[in-house]
Image (cartoon, rainbow, N blue to C red):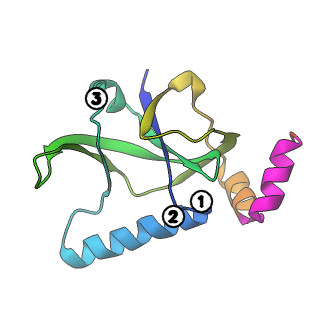
Amino acid sequence: MPLHLIKLAVGCESVKDLKGRIAERMRTAKKKGLPLHHIHITRMTPKRIDELLAGGSLYWVVRGEIAAREKIIAVEPFRDRDGIGRCRLVMRPKVIAVSPRPMRPFQGWRYLGEDAAPPDLGRAAAASVASMPEPLRRELRDLGLL
């Protein structure tokens, strides 16, 4: 059973904003001739790497909701220029919308078990939910209609 990570998408206002940021990073990587993978650098290295690489994803919390995920394809520990240990989370640059679920703020990342991970939204549902104004979507979710 795969294990997932969950992390705050700091500064992102919506899933659309997150997709735009990742797309911009991919354009920059393409111009520089780098592999087209989304890389997120963290301070701490996960200890359960094998479980993460067995089909795990990084779930993004956007404005207090678990809202999207990206498939993890590699976990690369390294040391930065100052000798501090860091970790590259390498993901496919495809953002998959998930059924929104409230999530309180936290620092760093956390493990997320398969049983606790929200399901993906279907294409039609993802398009319709993503096109709603953020306040309307949150209100419908709070009323139990989403």
Q: Is residue 100 left or right of residue 111?
A: right
Which amino acid is tagged 3?
A: Ile
Q: Identify which residue is drawn at 73% across, 52% down.
A: 125
Question: Contact (CB < 8 A) between labels 3 and 1?
Answer: no
Q: Identify which residue is drawn at 66% across, 46% down.
A: 121
Most common secondary structure along the magenta stretch: helix
- Image quarter where the C terminus lies is top right
- Image quarter where the N terminus lies is top left
Q: Can you tell which quarter of the image residue 123 is in?
A: bottom right
What's the magenta region? Answer: 131-143
Count the numbered circles shown: 3
Q: Secondary structure at mark 1?
A: helix
Question: Contact (CB < 8 A) between labels 3 and 2?
Answer: no
Q: CA distance from mark 2 to mark 1?
A: 6 Å
Numbered circle sitting on residue 15? 1
Q: CA distance from mark 3 to mark 2?
A: 25 Å
Question: Residue tagged by mark 2?
Answer: 19
Of residues 6 and 126, the one nearer the viewer is 6
Q: Can you tell which quarter of the image residue 22 is in?
A: bottom left
Q: Secondary structure at mark 2?
A: helix
x, y percent for residue 56: 41, 34
Which amino acid is tagged 1?
A: Val
Q: Is residue 66 magenta?
A: no
**Please, is residue 143 above or below residue 95 in the view?**
above
**Badge 2: how crowded within 10 Å, few (<14), some, or many (20+)?**
some
Question: Residue tagged by mark 3?
Answer: 49
Q: Identify which residue is drawn at 35% across, 69% down.
A: 25
Tell me which numbered mark, 3 or 1, is placed earlier along the sequence.
1
Which amino acid is tagged 2?
A: Lys
